[in-house]
Amino acid sequence: MSVKTAVLGGRPGLCAWAWLSGVPIGLVIALGGDDYLRSLWGTTLLLGAFASAIGIPFGAILAWLLWRLPARGRTVAIALVAAWLVMPLYLQAAAWKALADIALGTTIVGSWQTGSALLQAGWVHGAHAVPWSTAAFSVAIFFLPRAWEEQALLESRPVQAWLAATWPVWLGASAASVAWIMLVATTDITVTDLFQLRTFAEAIYLQYALGDATAFRPLSWESLLILAWLAFVVATTVRRIHPPIGEAVERTHWRLEHRSRRGWAATGALWSTLAFWIALPTAMLAYQAGIAHTSVDGQWTARWSGWKLVEMLVPLGSRAQPSVAVQFATEWYWSAWITGLGSLVTVCLASWLAWAAIAKRRLAIGVLIALAGIAAIPGPQWGIWLVQFFTAINVTWLNYLYDQTITAPVVAGVLRALPLTTLVWWLGFRTLPRHLCEAASLGGWGFWKQWWLLALPARSRVGFAAFGLAGAIIFGDLAATLPVIPPGVLTITVRVFDLLHAGVDDMAAAICLVLGIVVTLGTTLVLAATHHLRR
């Protein structure tokens, strides 16, 4: 098997045909579909396309700066990008909304017919997609064998060598990034509900929230056709970009000497990019959280106060302005429980599914299609189905689980995190040396014993990464969790959602700032510990 075939997954044509099949599907819906559904899906796909146009180029640039150019401070930059990767979507929404409020002097909530809300929501989705695209292109760089590029450079000019060796793998990373961005745009409502943008998922949520079951049928033939196409695209794209079976992953990034002028230029480009995408939103959150309103001669004025910012972030015991950590302690408590339980269930189930797809080839296609289908279903629809499951049938123990426990939000979080967590486990298991699995089979180890005694211990670090990723997805989920929150339970994500809609931007900004600081410090410590263990 050639190196190109190994890296691209053997049949890149299937992935291309999956994407191209969207053209006839779009024509069929345009000619015979419902006008309202055409409008919803048109807005949804435009949102994903605009976000992809922002996130993918900057993600590719960041990955190239991190792994192929001699930029200084690369370790710190990787930690920031990793922390930025797991930040919830509402943090990006609050930060960029604060910037627009300050720059324009008004609240950026427009009519969804005007098109301005589409640009605003697309920008936030694009900013959220930048670190995910960076991760996709980074994986492409690491899984690209260096010998392939060196051979191409010996046989042709640098540009032709890049097109022949590197570009096919980067094309796979681009396809994976577009598929992920489209999934988020199709299934999430965090940004679209804030900016009043009527997408498919937003229409499902509004129909449920308003109690109008006759507004439209979410699972009509048009929607089922597009969701099936999206699941097919995700499945074929993931199948195309897997790493070689049983081959060790080689660190292939090339770095030049720091003394070269190119190194200083790369450093400036890297940190300028990070300053725009990370430092600027963080500064806007800090400014928004520190705005204090005072009354002078009956007139209310707004000014920035550093002391108020400190009081909002640090629990100093102030009764006039308690910190968000103390004021919303109940929300943090329930979020921690739901995230912890959901992450544990997700990691265990995902590892089993990933190993089943590796060890039992007949199950691989079924697992991949099932997970792609789970990922393509909008979050509000999962929430509505869970509500119906727990309440439609008058079963005492189901009603008890729904009303008196956090079972429903945990299940909702597991459904949202399971596809991506399984992909992480799958990528880790794919790199297990083939001879270890063959030796285990010859020794009489069955499926469960190989999973428990071979796969999990050999990829324990993948388990920690999967747990953190699942926790980030469950903690930040709103679309599926919001409909199933039981009485007396409120998560920090729902609280921020309510605060942003109520215009209490300083509180929302302070919560996001605290969350950003904690996640950044935690990610940095984890990466530092991992780096220390490798030495």
Image: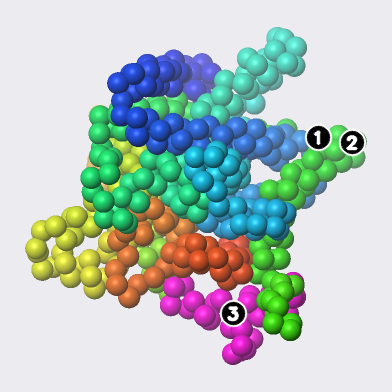
Residue in view at x 68 percent, y 39 percent: 62
Question: Is 177 within the magenta?
Answer: no
Label 3 Cα crowd, 10 Å radius (few <14 / some 14-19 / many 20+)? many
Is any part of residue 533 visible from this angle? no
Q: Which residue is mark 2?
A: 260
Magenta region: 304-332
Q: Nearer the viewer, residue 306 or 295?
A: 295
Q: Which residue is identified by label 1?
A: 256
Residue type indicated by callout 3: Ser
Q: Residues within 10 Å of mark 2 (few under 14, many from 20)?
A: few
In terms of image quadrants, where is residue 330? bottom left
Q: Residue tagged by mark 3?
A: 323
Residue 70 visible to an observer of this rendering: yes
Count neighbours of disc 1 (C-alpha within 10 A) and say few if under 14, some if 14 to 19, many if 20 or more: few
Residue 526 versus residue 445 in the image, above or below: below
Q: Residue furthest front?
A: 298
